[in-house]
Image: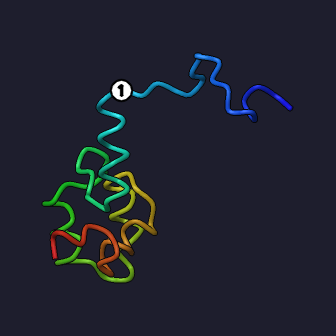
């Protein structure tokens, strides 16, 4: 049986060391808090999409903002950016 399985600590921790910023982001993500720094669309853009979107305009908005069509659909349907509803 290996030393690890016996419960003997070798004194060397072999995990990844993460910065404080990374740990805070992961903690917030686990709690379901929105990460504004990771968002691709501004609050203003989301409001514009919701106010003017039609089914034929999805591709146009996606190209304009540099995101996928599914992102625009999810914004329109309220799956993304729920905080702004």
Dividing the image into 4 quarters, which one contains the N terminus?
top right
Q: Quadrant of residue 76?
A: bottom left
Q: Residue 21: horizontal and vertical position, in percent?
A: 29, 32
Q: Position of residue 35 (x, y in %)?
A: 27, 51
Image coordinates for residue 36, horizontal then vertical, percent: 23, 50
Q: Residue at x 31, y 59 (%)?
A: 31
For residue 79, what is the image quadrant?
Answer: bottom left
In the displayed structure, 77 sits above or below 23; it is below
> On the picture, is 47 further left or further right than 29?
left
Colour treatment of the image:
rainbow
The answer to whether residue 22 is above or below residue 9 is below
Tell me what residue is drawn at x 29 percent, y 78 percent: 78
Q: Foreground residue, 79 or 22?
A: 22
Q: Mark 1 points at which residue?
A: 19
Residue 47 found in image quarter: bottom left
The residue positioned 36% from the left and 35% from the top of the image is 22
Total tally of numbered discs in the picture: 1
Neighbourhood count class around disc 1 (C-alpha, 10 Å): few under 14, some 14–19, many 20 upward: few
Q: Could you tell me which secondary element the residue under label 1 belongs to?
A: loop
Q: Residue at x 21, y 76 (%)?
A: 50
- Taking depth in this image into account, of 43 and 29 the one nearest to the observer is 29
> Is residue 58 depicted above or below 68 in this figure?
below
């Amino acid at each position: 049986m290996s030393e690890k399985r016996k419960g003997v600590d070798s004194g060397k921790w072999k995990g990844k060391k993460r910065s404080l910023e990374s740990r805070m982001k992961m903690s917030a993500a686990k709690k379901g808090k929105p990460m504004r720094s990771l968002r691709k669309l501004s609050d203003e853009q989301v409001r514009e999409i919701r106010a003017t979107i039609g089914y034929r305009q999805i591709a146009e908005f996606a190209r304009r903002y540099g995101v996928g069509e599914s992102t625009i659909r999810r914004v329109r349907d309220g799956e993304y950016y729920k905080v702004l509803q």
